[in-house]
Every structure is written in structure tokens, then in C-alpha cells.
Amino acid sequence: MTVVGPFGLSVRDQALEADVQAGLAAVEEGLLEATKSEVPFITEAAQHLVRAGGKRFRPLLVMLAAQFGDPYAPGIVPSAVVVELTHLATLYHDDVMDEAEVRRGVDSANTRWGNSVAVLTGDFLFARASHILADLGPEAVRIQAEAFERLVTGQILETAGPRDGRDPVEHYLDVLGGKTGSLVAVACRFGAMMSGADETVVDVLTQYGERLGVAFQLADDVLDIASDSHESGKTPGTDLREGIPTLPVLRLRERVERMGLPEDIALCELLDSDLTDDARHAEALARLRAHPALELARRDTVRYVEDARSGLAPLPDCGAKAALMELCDAVVHRAG
């Protein structure tokens, strides 16, 4: 039994382990090659987050989904590189919008080089992803374009907030479906599609990816509140400081509407205050860590994970299916 991929996923099938390890190594080489430029400074900025590491969650899903067809098909590794490049590009842009100082345990690109360089580097990565994608065929281009549209729409909806009368939690879950679920779904879809898997298998894995992607982000929400920077690789409470209402905060506000407890109202007032003040931010983070809303958010994470897991039922039993199920367990464990 060897540990591979994110969260220490253990693969018990030696042939599968070899395929996954070889695939991820090829993706790593592909990422470094795709982020090279004739301009040394662009190479340095574009490879900043690649070299910082990361879970490579999406490439791993491409490799596992490919096991339901021909795992050695030529489009698999390039499609995994495309998905990861797209993800990395969004991180550069996210850190600018969030004014984040740390990403993956290193200075964020905007901290090191400023917002303009960070945004343009993200654009550079999108361009390189598109160049690779063009060789994978028009269907792959269409799928990626639709996912990218959903991703951007989710980001805009997050900024705009829920329309009048819309439940904030439902709105937020829709946002996550676009921002995170869409690209994770594409990872699963590309792996299965490029391997020549049956269309029903492609559909099952795409739905799995969508649900797991949302669960992954919900776990991130919990981790952002509950962990320290060493554990999460970024500054804890970043969304809290920026006033972005992640699920623990939304569950708190929902509880205020339903129960109106004085201590909950006081915590909401603290969250609505100026959290750029370090002392106030630390107090809000500590009180939210001890609040039942955090446990409610954990339960929401588990619900999405279980939906993802149950959706795998039609697939044949094999090492890849077992690994996909173990990923569900890993996401739950990550959320505590």
C-alpha cells in the first residue's frame, strides 16, 4: 500500500498505483514545460505556484477516471495539464481579489510582484492551457469553455450576492457548483472521455466530480476557520477578513434568523465589523471555531460527499472505484 496524491490517498492496487504515479509525474513535467517562456521573469512568475506544490487533486481525478477506459491514451496527460493550469490561473486571480498574502505556504504572487503581474500571469496560464486544449479536439474545447463560463459566473454571483428572496445557503451552494464543482467535474470527464470510456461511465464520473468538487470546497471553508496556516497552506480566516460569507458564517446567520440568541447576534455583529483589525479578526475566528455553525458546515460537507459516493454505484468494482471512494473519505477527514 503506497500513499499517492492529495490527503495521502492510499492505492492498494499495484498496477493502478504505477499508472497513477507515472501519470502524475508526466503531468508535473507538462506543467513545467507549459509554464516556460522566452522571458525569464514570466517563467519565474508562472512557475511560482507550480513549484510551490499542491495537492494535484484534479490531475489525480483525471488519472483515476481514465482507468475506466484506456489509461494510456495520448490525450489523458495533456488534458490533466489543461485542468491544472486552469486551476492555477484562477488561484492567481483569486489571491488578487482576496488580497491574500499566502498561498500554498509561500508568498502569493500578488504579494511578491503586485496585482498587475499576478493577474497577467493568470492570463498567461489560461493562454497556455488553451494552446494545449486546441490539440485535444473541438469537443474538449467546448467542454472547457462551458466549465470556464460556469466558473466565472460562479465568481460573479459570489460577488453580487443572492437576489432578494433567495436563500443565501442555496445561492452559495450554486456558487460553489460553478466556482469549484465545474472544473473538478471536467477533470473526471476528460479522464474518462480521453480514455474512450463508455458514455454512461463518463456521465457517472462527471456527476461524481461535480459533487466531490463542492464537498472539497465546503471542506476548505471549514478548514479556513478551523485550521492554522501550517495545516491549510494559506492565511486562516482570509474570507472572514474580506467579508466573504462562507458556509460556517451563512449557517450562523441562518441560526440567528431562526433562534435569535443574543450570543449569536453578538457574533454576527463582530463579523460585520472591521476585521482588518488583527485583534478583532482573531476574536471572530476563535468564537466561530467554537460555534455550532462550524459543525453544521461539516455536516453539509459530509452530505455532499455521500452524494458523490453513492453516485459511483453503477461503476464496476475495481481499484479505481475504490480509490474514488477513498477520496470521499479523505475529504470528510479533511473537514474534521
Image (spheres, rainbow, N blue to C red):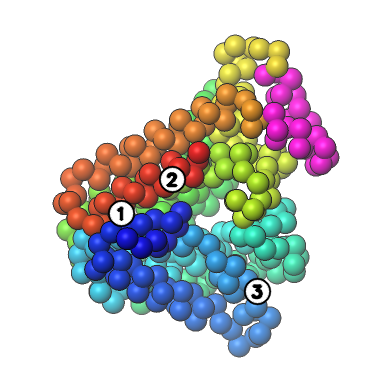
**Relative horizontal placement of residue 54, taking residue 196 as reference (left or right):** right
Tell me the element at label 3. helix
- Residue 30 lies, with reference to residue 299, above or below; the image says below
Q: Which residue is mark 3?
A: 45
Magenta extent: 264-287
**Relative horizontal placement of residue 67, taking residue 286 as reference (left or right):** left
Q: Earlier in the sequence, mark 2 or mark 1?
A: 1
Tag 3: residue type? Ala
Residue at the spot 41% in from the left edge and 74% down from the top edge: 25
Separation of disc 3 and disc 1 at Cα?
A: 34 Å
Asked where in the image residue 190 lies, by quadrant, the reply is bottom left
Q: Earlier in the sequence, mark 3 or mark 1?
A: 3
Q: x, y (%) of residue 160?
A: 61, 39
Q: Which residue is mark 2?
A: 331
Q: Residues within 10 Å of mark 2 (few under 14, many from 20)?
A: many
Residue 303 magenta: no
Tag 2: residue type? Val
Q: Earlier in the sequence, mark 2 or mark 3?
A: 3
Q: Which residue is mark 1?
A: 323
* Dominant SS type (magenta): helix
Closer-to-camera residue (209/288): 288
